[in-house]
Amino acid sequence: MRKTARRNVLAGGIAAVTAAALGAFALPAGSQAFSPVSYGPALPATVSATQPVRIVTTTLDATGRPVFAVREATDRTSAERIISSARKATGTVSVEIDRKVHALDVAEGDDTYREYQWDLDKMNVPGAWEQSTGADVVVAVIDTGVDGNHPDLAGNVLSGYDAIDDTEGGDSDGNGHGTHVAGTVAAVTGNGEGIAGVAPDAKVLPVKVLDADGSGWSSDTAEGIVWATDHGAQVINMSLGSNSSTDAEKAAVGYAIENGVTVVAAAGNEREEGSPTSYPAAYDGVIAVAATDADDEVAEYSNRGDYVDVAAPGSGILSTYPADLTEDGSEYAELNGTSMASPHVAAVAALIKASAPDITPQGIQNALEESAVDLGEDGFDPDFGHGRVDAAAAVEAAAGGGGGGDELITPELAVDGGGLVSYGSDTETTFQVSADGEALAGLEGEACVSVAGGKWDCDTVESDEDGVYLVEHTATGAFQVRVSVTETDTVASVEETAGYAVRATVSAKKSGKGTLTVKAAGAPGQKMALQRKSGSSWKTVKTLPVKAGTKISGLPGGSYRVVVAGTKAVQGVTSGTVKL
């Protein structure tokens, strides 16, 4: 279902997200399309060899597929050159600064080992096993890697991928966080070893995006999501995050969901810091998970917010751990965090998928939310979302149609618009909603416009008889137009965005002896320079504010042009040459 702003943090015990290796990687065919947005990112105050900046460019290849490229600059001049070149490239969707993501450690409990797993009983997991054990459902654990040799995971860990080094692998873990997450999902049950996983017959697909210190970059996360989707993942768990969203990561999440993958992420552990929105948990379509304790109270560290969908046990969670990372050589550890809560929900999603193979990601989310145990305020609330997950009830809800797997229509939303327009022009962006080739009329939605990366200004709209939403806007700076179809009992939510770059306009002509008349349009405060050719170069002879009409007289003979300087929101432009 459509969600408000969200964010994702490596919730819990240990890890964080790392960046992709320098280079480019393409989303496979059929990925979500994005329209160009060409205003550039703001550089950090310091760019140096010790504080380099990573610049991520999303472009479209010849077939319309998004392609991500990551380049590193060690000085401001190089960074500006990379950004300028990327913005001018054909098919550029976005140019942005790569974002660090990090794990939020939470103090461990006193007991390293527990006599039983309270979380499984609290979630009614044994009751769910009577209906499903997650047989052969593939759950990608995008994390620090997974210890594939752990005796309680033997046979349940597939060959994975290391997005940091762009190599096959992912079945080693120098941090422990990913192994702990994997054990919650699919530790082998009934083998006389340690613990039981929530979905003991599911398979774990390890994707390493975080290094040994549990830190990394969102570009690696994006690459990992795409790789997991292309290699059979049916559920993705991300117990990691950042306070900032990126277009690359959002595109990867959209691609996964469009290809039928259920995406689950931790809601974050920064409650004491005001619960900043966490990504990828806050992206549309991602199931964001808060953490509860053994008393069904919200964990003291768990983020609250409108993006939280459900809650699950996250405090005092016993799971698998690499023996070489524990002080006593133990192969199990107890950790706290929304990192620990998220895999509980991902594993229940696997139970549902195994019992109802044709169910959609939206159907799984519906089943989880409709069957959850309501805690806190009546109904939805920002601490628990729709409530604490009940595994048995969720599987039953999906089997009984409560998950909306086949009955909910997932419409298509096609957008016509985006690109480069002139300052002050009146634009019309059309979005057409349809299903099976038939227009859907009378569907309520929300049309929003964001100028220069600012807040979204939204209005309620309704599709006309042709299924069209028309959004009009006067171009005063680079902007995005977004339409979200409101979810109903029969129609799922869907959202699309078009991006526009805006360029100033300028013309100059001779209107008398030594006189030029200049007509220009641009942002308030935007400047234009009158330049005279001197040899092979141009020299500025006068700087003026951009105005609709300006007459400049008393000029000596020669060749002149007018250059309007660009701003963050409005691109610059140069007039033709005029001879006086």
Image (tube, rainbow, N blue to C red):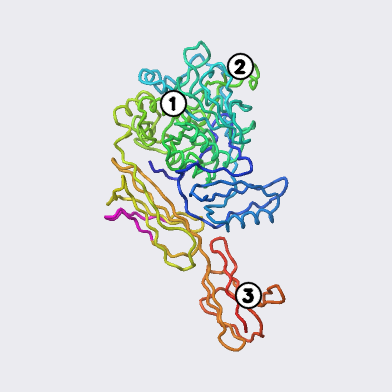
Crowding at mark 2 (Cα within 10 Å: few <14, some 14-19, many 20+): some
Mark nearest the camera among 1 and 3 is 1
The relative height of residue 250 versus residue 36 in the rendered view (above or below) is above
Mark nearest the camera among 1 and 2 is 1
Crowding at mark 3 (Cα within 10 Å: few <14, some 14-19, many 20+): some
For mark 1, give the secondary structure. Answer: loop
Is residue 464 found inside the magenta-colored segment of the image?
A: yes
Q: Residue beneath label 1, please? A: 137
Q: Nearer the viewer, residue 323 or 270?
A: 323
Position of the C terminus by quadrant: bottom right
Q: Residue beneath label 2, please? A: 330
Q: Nearer the viewer, residue 4 or 297?
A: 4
Extent of the magenta region = 457-471
Which image quadrant for residue 161? top right
Furthest residue to the front?
Answer: 62
Residue visible at 71% across and 77% down in the picture: 534
Residue 220 image point, x, y percent: 58, 39
The relative height of residue 508 versus residue 113 in the rendered view (above or below) is below
Furthest residue to the top?
Answer: 192
Going from N to C along the chain, the mark reached first, 2 or 3, is 2
Amino acid type, callout 3: Thr
